[in-house]
Image (cartoon, rainbow, N blue to C red):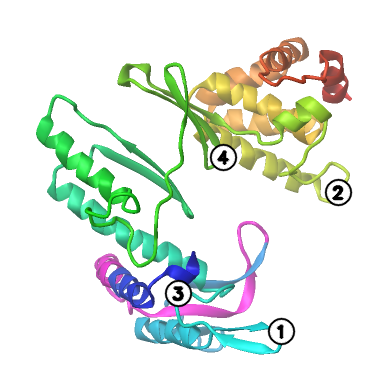
Amino acid sequence: MFTWLAREGILAALDWAFAVIIPHMKQKKRNFKGMIQVSKSKWLDKDNRLKHNVGWHHSSSRDEYIVFSPEELKLLVRMDFANSYFQMGDLIISQIHGCPIGGFLSSPLARLYCIHDEAKLFRKLTNDNLQCNFFGVRQMDDLLLLIAINHADRKQKNKIRRYIRSFRHAQHTDAPPIYTGGLELEEEQLDTKGRYVQLTFSGSDLCIGVEPHFGFHSKPHFKNWESLMKDQKVKAPRLPPLDSYIDKSVREITVRGMLHLFKSQSSDSRYLEIAVHQLLYECQYPRALFKQSLRIMEANSPHTWQPIYKRFRQPQTSNNILKNIIKSGDWDNLNASVSTFKRRLWQ
């Protein structure tokens, strides 16, 4: 919660970030000035959205950019803190704790606060020679933490248990917390099925073996798939609909972006190929558009995409893959028949 963050901790995280980044940039660029610039006009970014250009100062034109120092940036943050108000009926209330609710700077500052705490954790892990035992991925306020323990090494196991107690600070107050200043971790109970722990994180379905030799699997998560199986409806569309007034090239770029994402989320080429067919069924785009996108992907990365593109070009083979996806569904009320899928797929 933004309102729980300690403001002095946020300012300390800003000081730490500049103390790390500026010396590094000066080593890379001799004329680095350590100043920040923001364009006065909006430019098109890579996603064709109009945004102000923000970066390290490199232009001498004061007509195009607003330039300020790290100290002036801290002053802006303090001004944001000091002028945070909201209204309840006729009552105007000043917020005196945490980041301003709905403030433009609140989300970036909260992420910086997390990064600062995590950097301190990395230094502790390195000092304890445990940096290779911890692997974590955080997306906004969701954290996936994987810890490897050698149970035969009692000394290492005791050290790691202390760190686990620190992560679970809300339940174990005897250990210093990893995240400070109002940040707390809420542990989620995992679903264990047989030899694997199953969870969904950052758009991926993960199966992690309860023993090291079981390994792990990762595949893209399709949150609309169950509703498609039951009701033939997409509850949460994630691609522009086919009947929208969007240029064909935009659809092609969107599909290629999704395919790139699926590649990073798939631990096996089988999962990647299944995800391609699931996306085709979900968005109802023409097969020709997917075929063109896969051809471009195959040209850039033939080792990964050539077998998938080759089978996709064969309608019977591609259709059999989709049949197998349907038959392997785990949902109780599977109303969609193979003929319905074929009609929807090839229309």
Secondary structure type for disc 1: loop
Q: Is residue 235 magenta?
A: no
Three-letter amino acid code of the residue under disc 4: Gly
Q: Callout 2: 10 Å neighbours few (<14), some, many (20+)? A: few
Q: Tell me the distance, in whole angstroms, between the alpha carbons under discs 1 and 2.
A: 41 Å
Three-letter amino acid code of the residue under disc 1: Gly
Horizontal side, residue 271 vs residue 313: left or right: left
Task: Name the residue that disc number 4 marks.
Answer: 203
User: In front here: 189 or 256?
Assistant: 189
Q: Tell me the distance, in whole angstroms, between the alpha carbons under discs 1 and 3.
A: 23 Å
Residue 130 visible at all: no
Do labels 1 and 3 touch, CB within 8 Å? Answer: no
Task: Name the residue that disc number 3 marks.
Answer: 98
Vertically, is 3 above or below 254? below
Mark 4 vs 2, N-terminal side: 4
* Residue 251 location (% of width, % of height): 75, 44
Horizontal side, residue 174 vs residue 97: left or right: left
Residue 31 visible at all: yes
Task: Name the residue that disc number 1 marks.
Answer: 89
Which residue is pictured at 88% across the width and 20% down the height? 343
Highlighted magenta segment, given as a residue range: 19-48
Q: Tell me the distance, in whole angstroms, between the alpha carbons under discs 4 and 2.
A: 25 Å
Q: Tell me the distance, in whole angstroms, between the alpha carbons under discs 2 and 3.
A: 42 Å
Task: Name the residue that disc number 2 marks.
Answer: 244
Three-letter amino acid code of the residue under disc 3: Gly
Q: Tell me the distance, in whole angstroms, between the alpha carbons under discs 4 and 3.
A: 29 Å
Q: Is residue 31 magenta?
A: yes
Three-letter amino acid code of the residue under disc 2: Ser
Mark 4 vs 1, N-terminal side: 1
Mark 2 vs 3, N-terminal side: 3
